[in-house]
Structures are given as structure tokens and as C-alpha cells.
Image: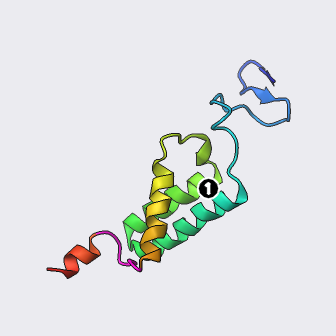
Amino acid sequence: MTTQTPGRRAARADGGLDSGLDSGLDSGLDSGERQRYLEAAEHALRAYPGALGELVHRELRAFADFGYRLAGDGLIARLAAEVLSAVRDGDTAGPGAREGADR
């Protein structure tokens, strides 16, 4: 249940703010999921040096902290899985490193 004060966001009965989004997207990540995104963010800094790694790191951290409420297309989940699988496979040089080594 929400209450609305003019000029303010709706307040939920539990005292939080209603984002106005579907309630299924407004629930938080469990601690295991959040940890997975944070782990992927840290791996991104090592696996993708420079601006690309920083960008991936920021996006994954933001998603872990609060972005899960906004993203519904699965892109960040796929990004985290790709970063973590690259690290597990030993590809710490980033995308294209193997192709460049073959030349």
C-alpha cells in the first residue's frame, strides 16, 4: 500500500519509497547475487585494462548497489556472466586478445 503526498514520491507502508516500477523489479538482490556482481566488477578491472574495464566495473557495481530496480533486459546479468567466465577460462587480457595472438 502506498500513500501519495503532493510533490513527493509515494511512500510504501514499510516506510520506503515506491519507485513506481513493477514490484517484481523493485525487490533487492539476495546477498549471493549481489556478491556475484561485485566480484565481476572487480574482475573487470583486471581483465579489461583502461577505460573499458572502468566502465564495466562501474556498471556492475551500480547494478549491485541499486540498478537492479531499473534494468529489466538482462544485459547486466549477461555482462557479469561473461566477465566471470572469461576469468575462469584464464582470459585476463580481455576480448580479442586470443585473436590478436594468432596473427
Extreme residue toward the top, this view: 6
Q: Could you say which is closer to the camera, residue 89 or residue 83?
A: 89
What's the magenta region?
Answer: 90-95
Q: Residues within 10 Å of mark 1 (few under 14, many from 20)?
A: many
- Rendering coords of residue 83 (x, y %): 45, 66
Q: Secondary structure at mark 1?
A: helix
Q: Main secondary structure of the magenta part?
A: loop
Residue topped by disc 1: 64
Extreme residue toward the right, this view: 14
Q: Within the image, what quadrant is residue 10 found in?
A: top right
Q: Could you say which is closer to the camera, residue 60 or residue 91?
A: 91
Residue 29 shown left or right of residue 57 in the figure:
right
Mark 1 is on which residue type? Ala
Asked if residue 21 is positioned above or below residue 61 in the image, the reply reads: above
Extreme residue toward the left, this view: 103
Q: Could you say which is closer to the camera, residue 32 or residue 63?
A: 32
* Residue at (42, 76) in percent of width and height: 89
Where, quadrant-wise, is the N terminus in this rendering?
top right
* Residue at (60, 63) in percent of width and height: 36
Asked if residue 59 is positioned above or below residue 19 in the image, the reply reads: below
Residue 78 shown left or right of residue 95 in the figure:
right
- Rendering coords of residue 13 (x, y %): 85, 29
